[in-house]
Image: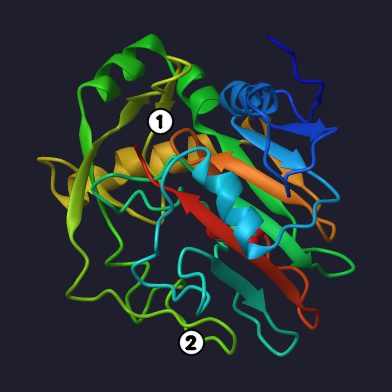
Amino acid sequence: MTKAVIEIRRTAGALGAEILGVDLSGDLDNATFDAIHQAFVDHQVIFFRGQALTPEAHKRFGRRFGSLNVHPYVKGMDEHPEIMEIIKEPTETTNFGGGWHSDMSFLEKPSIGSILYALEVPDFGGDTLFASQAAAYEALSPGLQATLEGLNAIHSAGREYSSKGSSAQKRQSMQVSEAEGLAGEFIHPVVKVHPESGRKALYVNPAFTMRIDGWTKRESKPLLSFLFEHSRQEAFTTRFRWSKGSVAFWDNRSVWHYALNDYHGQRRHMRRVTVDAN
Ligand code: SIN
């Protein structure tokens, strides 16, 4: 069997690696795909630079990992409903994804990962932050780890995609609908075991986790506030500076992300495909 030649450069202590020597636009041979897949499992978020992805190529790469999600609230491209365009115009002040979250944790079967491709980036700002929820879990005391392993949490899009939530704010270039009344509530373990690495990670996030299952909102708040504060510590993060043609692929099962909104007056245009759970 031929071994793929890819170079992997870690970006931070907790998570993240840049992958060099790969062109994602064509059909990847199995050895290269396996090497990328392994890097994704090992590093939780992987980055590529200098890519030229048509919508078809973007989807083809995503489909190597699983079927693609059609977002229930954010309208996709007309010809490619699985591709979400994340755009902030120079005249806009609200960005999309500007808070710590894990994509699609509000679904019954949340996503494996998201693949974000940069078409146009600001001269400065617009970086994305990532936080390893595996590192966050591992830094907790054995006592709290054991307590959390016995808990489940309720997730919903109902707050974030409501008229008051930041995701559903009216935008010039994105059509986002409100979820109020439609959003279901789904239950997920507070600690998830990664199916491929076997590593445990916290699986609650400030955008979509509503409460601990069987607890009231008021009872849940102190514990969730502690976990949200704990999980975004600098030591658990990496930060990606985008350039045109960059790609980031993060594991939603063990990574939070945060799109910084520090580039008012400039345009940022990204495309995202989101890989469903198998
Ligand atoms: C998101 O998927 O939450 C957006 C991330 C970004 O635009 O950097």
Tell me if mark 1 has few (under 14), some (14-19) or many (20+) residues whose alpha carbon lies within 10 angstroms of its own. Answer: many
The quarter holding residue 260 reads bottom right
Which one is in front, 82 or 56? 56
Residue kind at label 2, given as amino acid type = Lys
Q: Amino acid at mark 1?
A: Leu
Q: Residue at x 79, y 42 (%)?
A: 23
N-term mark: 2 or 1: 2
In which quadrant is the C terminus drawn? Answer: top left
Secondary-structure class at tag 2:
loop
The residue where tag 2 is placed is 170
In depth, the one of 214 and 2 nearer the eye is 2
Residue at the spot x=58%, y=41% of the render?
A: 250
Between 76 and 150, the one nearer to me in the picture: 76
Q: Residues within 10 Å of mark 2 (few under 14, many from 20)?
A: some
Q: Is residue 166 toward the left or the right of residue 132 in the image?
A: left
Residue at the left extreme, as displayed: 214
According to the picture, the residue beneath numbered tag 1 turns out to be 202
- Residue 80 locus on image (x, y percent): 51, 70
